[in-house]
Amino acid sequence: MNKIIKIGMLLVAMITITSTIQAQKFGYVNSQAILAEMAEVKQARAKLEALGKQLEKKGQQMVTAFQTDYQALADKEKKGILSPKQLQEEANKLKEREAKIGQYQQDMQRQLAEKEQTELKPILDKVNNAIKAVAKEDGYQFIFDSSTNVILFADESSDVTAKVKAKL
């Protein structure tokens, strides 16, 4: 009798586990395709590109001025116009400017990265919220992103990209 009860309980446990596993629903979305079609992303990219060009132009002006001053110092050195002390002082000033140019380039990259984060975060949040809404509405427990190449196989019927686009 004990043996029958144990077998019965084991069968109930197996059926419960099997039904739980079968109840999970998986889907995938191509977030890069969604982002590529969003007007907000295109506007953000345009802003970033404009800022990048503006910063690059200023950096190029700094480099051009540096090169001009460097060449002028080299000419003065050839002509012997400057004393060794004056030459050293001018060379030190140029080294400081060169370091400032390097610092500017690093600051420029940081500034662009921060601006990209600021511009894209609300858009990414909007897409993620749409993905969550589709997942909840359609009963998905997991949604994977096919643009990250993590999915090894997925049936196309599990693609919720169109539904997410519709939410946006």
Image (cartoon, rainbow, N blue to C red):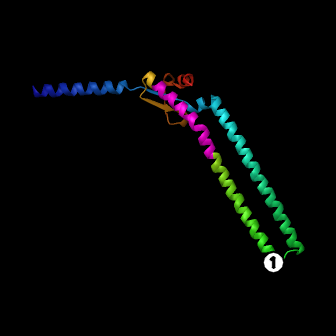
Image position of 38 (left or right of 6): right
Image position of 142 (left or right of 125): left
Write down the residue under mark 1.
84
Asked whether 49 or 145 is in front, the reply is: 49
Q: Position of residue 16 (x, y in %)?
A: 28, 25
Q: Position of residue 139 (x, y in %)?
A: 42, 23
Examine the image and state in which quarter residue 22 appears. Answer: top left
**Magenta segment, prevailing SS (helix, strand or loop):** helix
At 85% from the left edge and 65% from the top edge, which residue is drawn?
A: 72
**Would you say residue 99 sits in the magenta stretch?**
no
Q: How many numbered marks have been drawn onto this rendered protein structure? A: 1
Quadrant holding the N terminus: top left
At 14% from the left edge and 26% from the top edge, which residue is drawn?
A: 5
Asked whether 115 or 138 is in front, the reply is: 115
**Taking 84 as reference, is 75 above or below it?**
above
**Would you say residue 131 sits in the magenta stretch?**
yes
Image position of 72 (left or right of 105): right
Callout 1: helix, strand or loop? Answer: helix
- Kindly identify the amino acid type of the residue bearing the numbered disc 1: Pro
Examine the image and state in which quarter residue 78 appears. Answer: bottom right
Quadrant holding the C terminus: top right
Q: Position of residue 10 (x, y in %)?
A: 21, 28
Q: Position of residue 118 (x, y in %)?
A: 60, 41
**Taking 117 as reference, is 85 above or below it?**
below
**Taking 156 as reference, is 44 above or below it?**
below
**Taking 33 as reference, is 116 above or below it?**
below
Which range is magenta? 113-135
| Label 1 crowd bin: few (<14), some (14–19), many (20+), radius 10 Å | few
Instruction: Give the residue at the far bottom of this rendering.
Output: 84
Examine the image and state in which quarter residue 162 appears. Answer: top right
